[in-house]
C-alpha cells in the first residue's frame, strides 16, 4: 500500500472515530489528526508525482541522446 493510501485510510479512521461516542474535546483532536493525515497524503502524492515526472524527463533525455 502506498504511503498516501495508508495516510488516507488513517485519516478516514480518525474522522469515523470523531463521529462516534467520543467527548467533544477528543472528537476535535481526532478531526484535527485526520486533517493532518490528509495533508500528509497530499504531500506524499505530490512527491510521488514529482519523482515520476523527473524520471520520465530523464528517460526522454536518454532516448534523445541514444536516438
Image (cartoon, rainbow, N blue to C red):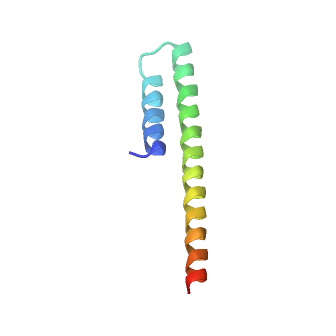
Residue at image point 48% right, 38% down: 7
Q: Name the foreground residue: 24 vs 8.
A: 8
**In this rendering, would 12 be left or right of 50?**
left
Return the residue found at the far front. Answer: 66
49 is higher (above) or lower (below) than 23: below
Q: Name the foreground residue: 8 vs 60.
A: 60
2 is higher (above) or lower (below) than 26: below
Residue at image point 42% right, 21% down: 20
Return the residue found at the far bottom. Answer: 67
Return the residue found at the far left. Answer: 1
- In percent of width and height, residue 53 lies at 59, 63
- In percent of width and height, residue 1 lies at 38, 45
Residue 40 sits in which quadrant? top right
28 is higher (above) or lower (below) than 63: above
Residue at image point 47% right, 40% down: 8
**In this rendering, would 56 be left or right of 17?**
right
- In percent of width and height, residue 66 lies at 56, 83
Residue 65 sits in which quadrant? bottom right
**In this rendering, would 15 be left or right of 47?**
left
Quadrant that contains the C terminus: bottom right
Number of dots carrying numbers:
0
Amino acid at each position: 500500500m502506498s504511503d498516501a493510501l495508508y495516510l488516507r485510510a488513517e485519516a478516514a479512521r480518525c474522522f469515523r472515530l470523531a463521529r462516534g461516542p467520543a467527548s467533544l474535546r477528543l472528537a476535535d483532536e481526532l478531526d484535527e489528526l485526520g486533517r493532518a493525515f490528509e495533508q500528509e497524503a497530499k504531500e506524499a502524492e505530490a512527491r510521488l508525482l514529482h519523482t515520476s515526472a523527473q524520471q520520465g524527463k530523464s528517460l526522454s533525455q536518454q532516448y534523445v541522446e541514444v536516438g
